[in-house]
């Protein structure tokens, strides 16, 4: 029998928790009290193919227990899917406060443990080259996860809380993108080695707000009273971000930072700056450009190292502005560059937050009508812009504003997992204003608390890729040590060897 009073007490305990461990303990009790725990224990649900998953789980467990390694490899070759039998459906992650069906969690864990078992050098019934080929193919086909942080202005402190919550659970992806305030937070995270991140986050943000240390103390030392200026942003970049290129930053930490910027001039294309596309560009200027909101801050000339190691302008005198105007969340580009197919979004854009749903697209009749109305309105706006394209071109200022508005309207602002502030309403006019110490602490706190309910979903849905990535790196390094040259990647091999389908 469910007791509403007991559930409310547990919900209050979750709301006042000072750590994820406290929150999770109260959430598990809530699941037990509400009956959600019983739901997790039962395989059955019409929302996914529980029979196939149960059969496959039992088969893999049996093969591993018998140490039938070649049959285990064959079974894994048949398919490692992120959405096997529909187990990735959003509806399966909202019934309980913590996790989903135990069957799904056990299956993902078994896949990860089977991969680690096969990677063990003591498993010598399969030769090294065959293992390397399998792990590379599995990683290439299964895909990877990325964290995308939206444009935010001074709501960037929410991103900081999200990053802290993920880091403390060792769930922070190695691939990160960020626009505007998200670019600032992401670049600091990607340029900080692990020990520095531990120091920055460990105890640096106190939920009781009576004491500050570490990162929060450094942040509060910079709080001003007037409207933020470009000089303030540059000083903060010098204080928090080493003067590194994208390539140097990536080599230092192994994390890939991606900063979208938009051209200040017409007839130019937006760019996604990172260690792959622009390795010699300096990160500080890239972040400054990503925070250059037109009409508030001047456009920025990017800087890069030349072949002599000297600083020079990137692409001559071209100037760049806030990338969120053209591509706030560069999902397609991340997919193409890194094979990302799972996106965690920290969304703080004050113009967007009130209108987004932090869950995936719903399929009920009312929701479908709402989506159809939105899609129809967007189509009419785009059609109207096309009709008046020529008249608008006669007034360049109006054409630029129209192009920016269309870009904003046509973007997607959610991911597979979307994390947004608890409070949906934030005044956009304060996006460039200094925040008080209390507001900063509250935004960081909101970032953490908004992430906690999604921690177990992130843990489960990223477990396979988090297992594969270090295995592939280790095997490729061992290949170099033995043969003196890098192993061929799946991209190179695909020209001559048809890849067996493994993935989502």
Image (cartoon, rainbow, N blue to C red):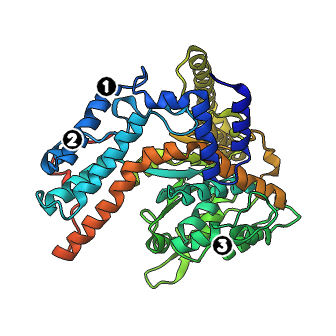
Residue 51, position as x, y percentages in the image: 31, 25
Question: Which quadrant of the figure contains the C terminus?
Answer: top left
> Which callout, 2 or 1, points at the residue further toward the start of the chain?
1
> Residue 395 lies in what quarter of the image?
top right
Q: In this figure, which residue is indicated by the disc labeled 3?
A: 240
Viewer-nearest residue: 32 or 154: 32
Q: Which mark is residue 51?
A: 1
> Which callout, 1 or 3, points at the residue further toward the start of the chain?
1
Q: Residue at x 69, y 53 (%)?
A: 158
Viewer-nearest residue: 252 or 312: 252
Q: Residue at x 18, y 48 (%)?
A: 73
Query: SS for tag 2?
Result: helix
Query: SS for tag 3?
Result: helix
Q: Residues within 10 Å of mark 2 (few under 14, many from 20)?
A: few
- Report the mark closest to the observer, 2 or 3: 2
Residue 192, position as x, y percentages in the image: 55, 71
Compared with residue 136, is residue 419 higher up or lower down, i.e. above or below? above
Residue 477, position as x, y percentages in the image: 27, 70
- Report the mark closest to the observer, 2 or 1: 2
Compared with residue 101, is residue 158 higher up or lower down, i.e. above or below? below
Question: Which quadrant of the figure contains the N terminus?
Answer: top right
- Report the mark closest to the observer, 1 or 3: 1
For marks 1 and 3, give the CA distance.
Answer: 52 Å
For marks 2 and 1, give the CA distance.
Answer: 17 Å
Q: Residue furthest right?
A: 225
Q: Are marks 1 and 3 in contact (CB under 8 Å)?
A: no
Q: Which mark is residue 189?
A: none
Q: In this figure, which residue is indicated by the disc labeled 2?
A: 62
Compared with residue 289, is residue 109 higher up or lower down, i.e. above or below? above
């Amino acid at each position: 029998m469910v007791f509403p009073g007991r559930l409310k007490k547990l919900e209050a305990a979750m709301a006042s928790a000072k750590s994820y461990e406290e929150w999770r303990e109260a959430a598990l009790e809530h699941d037990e009290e509400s009956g959600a725990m019983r739901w997790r224990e039962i395989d059955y649900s019409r929302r996914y193919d529980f029979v196939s998953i149960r059969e496959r789980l039992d088969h893999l467990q049996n093969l591993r227990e018998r140490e039938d390694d070649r049959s285990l490899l064959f079974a894994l070759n048949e398919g490692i899917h992120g959405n096997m039998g529909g187990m990735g459906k959003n509806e399966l992650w909202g019934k309980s406060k913590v996790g989903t069906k135990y069957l799904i969690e056990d299956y993902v864990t078994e896949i990860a443990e089977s991969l680690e078992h096969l990677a063990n050098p003591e498993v010598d019934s399969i030769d090294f080259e065959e293992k390397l080929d399998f792990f590379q193919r599995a990683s290439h086909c299964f895909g990877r996860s990325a964290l995308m942080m939206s444009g935010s202005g001074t709501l960037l402190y929410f991103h900081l809380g999200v990053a802290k919550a993920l880091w403390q659970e060792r769930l922070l992806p190695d691939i990160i993108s960020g626009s505007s305030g998200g670019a600032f937070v992401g670049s600091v995270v990607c340029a900080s080695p692990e020990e520095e991140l531990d120091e920055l986050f460990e105890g640096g943000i106190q939920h009781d707000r009576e004491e500050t240390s570490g990162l929060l103390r450094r942040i509060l030392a910079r709080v001003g009273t007037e409207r933020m200026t470009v000089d303030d942003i540059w000083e903060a970049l010098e204080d928090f971000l080493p003067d590194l290129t994208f390539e140097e930053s990536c080599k230092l930490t192994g994390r890939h930072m991606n900063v979208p910027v938009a051209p200040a001039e017409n007839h130019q294309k937006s760019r996604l700056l990172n260690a792959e596309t622009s390795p010699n560009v300096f990160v500080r200027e890239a972040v400054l450009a990503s925070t250059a909101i037109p009409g508030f801050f001047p456009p920025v000339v990017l800087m890069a190292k030349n072949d002599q190691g000297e600083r020079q302008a990137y692409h001559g005198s071209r100037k760049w502005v806030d990338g969120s105007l053209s591509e706030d969340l560069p999902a397609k580009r991340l997919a193409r560059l890194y094979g990302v197919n799972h996106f965690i979004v920290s969304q703080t854009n004050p113009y967007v937050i009130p209108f987004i749903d932090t869950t995936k697209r719903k399929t009920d009749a009312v929701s479908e009508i709402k989506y159809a109305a939105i899609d129809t309105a967007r189509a009419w706006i785009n059609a109207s812009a096309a009709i008046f394209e020529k008249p608008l071109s006669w007034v360049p200022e109006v054409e630029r504003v129209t192009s920016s508005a269309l870009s904003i309207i046509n973007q997607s602002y959610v991911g597979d997992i979307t994390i947004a502030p608890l409070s949906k309403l934030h005044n956009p006019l304060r996006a460039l204003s200094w925040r008080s110490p209390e507001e900063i602490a509250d935004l960081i706190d909101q970032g953490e608390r908004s992430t906690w309910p999604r921690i177990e979903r992130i843990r489960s849905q990223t477990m396979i890729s988090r297992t594969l990535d270090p295995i592939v790196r280790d095997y490729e390094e061992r290949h170099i040590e033995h043969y003196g040259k890098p192993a061929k990647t799946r991209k190179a091999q695909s020209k001559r060897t048809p890849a067996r389908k493994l993935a989502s």
